[in-house]
Image (spheres, rainbow, N blue to C red):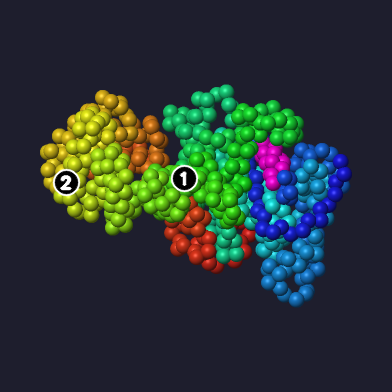
Amino acid sequence: MELTSPSLPPLGTTGEVITFYSYKGGTGRTMALSNIAVLLARRHDATEPVLMIDWDLEAPGLHHYFDHHPDHKPGVLEFFEACHEQLQSRLDGVALDEETLAHEVLGAVGWEHYVTRVDEGSQLYLMRAGRLDDTFAERLAAMDWEQLFHRCPALFRCFADRLARHFRYVLVDSRTGRTDVAGICTTLLPRKLVLVFTPNRQSLDGVQALVQRATTYRRSHEDEQRPLMVYPLPSRMEMDDSAQRAQWRRDDASQHIVGYQSGFEQVLRDSYGMQQLSLESYFDEVQLQQTRALAHGEQVAVRQECGGDRFSLTRTFESLLAWLAPGYFPWQSLREIALLDLIGEARRALERGGVAARAVAAPLARELNALGALYRDEGRWRQAQASFEESVALRQRGLGEDHPDTLLSKANLAGVLRRQGRLDEAQFLDESIVDARDRQLGAEHLDTLAARADLADTLAAQGRLAEALSLQDAVLDAYLRLLGAEHLQTLSARLARAGLLLQLGDIDSARSIQEQVLAARKRLLGAEHAETLRAKSALANTLLQMQETDAARSLLDAVLQAQLRRLGPEHAETRNARDQLVDAQMQLGVPAGEAPLVPELHQNASMDDYGDALLRPSRRHGAPVNKNLYEKGTAGMRSPAIASGKIL
């Protein structure tokens, strides 16, 4: 295969640097990088250039995945040897600021001479570790990375920026462990960091500590305040042992195993200053299975596999790319990503105009409504509101004010506004929906009754309890006549009426209704159905007001245990159940910190803005929010040494 140096024009948009790192060897890190690189180079009709950099200088091997690469070709080591010589030649020259000096040096050396094309079917390029001759080991030992960093701290960052002008993706294969090179590759270069690990304590501790060091460094230095997105990649997972996979992922207290999912959720919360996130959907899809390709040889699986079924390595790498390539956070669910992709395509069609724009308006409104519902269920109220508002606007323009789809989006928007305390706006929407339903369907149509029940909720939230109760009673009477006493909608209306009676001070009547609804739901739906659990919580809250604390605590404990089994510890409903149980135990005189019956959960908080995750510092560090990306932590630390641990 003929290997040629590239002559690439600048991209229209800036590319990005992605580092692949593993704390220990044997994870399949280089294999993962090579497969991801091939997939990325195939995208968009193979028109976007992709560069791989083998920076694992002590154990170079990336070139083995791409046919026979001549050992005489210079690479990373020779490139930075040349940079060192250029810096030496400028010691007695005119003093320049760091960035100007870095760009002068990089321009003089020229990256083009150190990069070769390794795939004639796509724009895939490689910068190998270096010229693997008899002098390589000696020259590598003589390379002082820390000294190079001190002479021009902007050199590595500008190197990454320069490459990103010509390559859509720059994939860096980093050295393992805590070394100068690993610090450069994981902290100074990338925008995204793929952490390849095997499910053992050493590997996990190493990569999680790396995340903390890298994000702390980015937060703490003004010149380095750039986002760093982290993507854990579990490797060598035994697909035929589901019990072991679950044990390593989910925790096993009996074996003193802390699962990697909860470990990464905690380190990401700490690093990005978030109080709540879940990697459930991400780790459902992203697990690199143990295969022969990992055990022997340098094979690029995505080149060997035709099609790639759900058991293939190709499918695993494509799953990772669903998050990695577009830059979605790993705590965003696959459902959210799918909706965002559909919405993005539809918006681009709208911008182009013409017949296509008219055709996508209705699907766009539908997907926005679905996205709003997803955000609402996750407690992300501002994002839910924005999605519903856009859906309403599109449907109003395309379908009219009173079309059933428009009314559906309006009802969803009203519910989110009500939840945020924007009650006058919610009331206006609720009344318009009731009026439209009444005119179109009649006063006792089920959709009209549901709209009246929503309006009653808003009136109650405004403190207009008598009006709300009158409206709710009318809805309940209609349900009893139309559906019967034990229909699920009737039971929901009865529970809503009990809530209003409770607010009006009629606690005994409220309790009686709640007990009847709970018994009916248990009989119809089962003891752990979501609606049954809500009825238990409602009754427990009434019992708390009646000072029947033991009975309330027993109910709330049952709700919490059921939610843990159903939804897991990070779900909003589980957190709410935990908070209610803590309140009950405190009324019994048990401090929150000494409540052994309550599982250890993290503090509840809404996730209104995923985009804010990289704009907020970790609150555990106690620093103010920086107006750029991270807080300006240790102000006096201008260019800390790599080897001293400021980067590592």
Q: Is residue 111 left or right of residue 627?
A: right
Q: Main secondary structure of the magenta part?
A: helix
Other residues around mark 1 within 10 Å, as few (<14) / some (14–19) / many (≥20): many
- Whole-percent x, y for residue 623 in the image: 45, 61
Which label sits on residue 366? 1
Q: Amino acid at mark 2?
A: Ser
Find out whether residue 45 is within the magenta segment.
no
- The residue lying toward the viewer, choosing from 298 and 599, is 298
- Whole-percent x, y for residue 201 in the image: 54, 36
Q: How many marks?
A: 2
The part of the chain drawn in magenta is: 28-44
- The residue lying toward the viewer, choosing from 358 and 27, is 358
Cα–Cα gap, marks 1 and 2: 34 Å
- Whole-percent x, y for residue 470 in the image: 16, 46
Q: Quadrant of the N terminus?
A: top right
Which label sits on residue 415? none
Find out whether residue 39 is within the magenta segment.
yes
Residue 439 position (above or below residue 189) = above
Q: Residue furthest bottom?
A: 94
Residue 426 position (above or below residue 318) = below
Q: Is residue 196 visible?
A: yes
Compare marks 1 and 2 and give the one earlier in the sequence. Answer: 1
Q: Amino acid at mark 1?
A: Arg
* Residue indicated by mark 2: 470
Residue in the image at 75% along x and 42% along y: 62
Q: Is residue 555 visible?
A: no
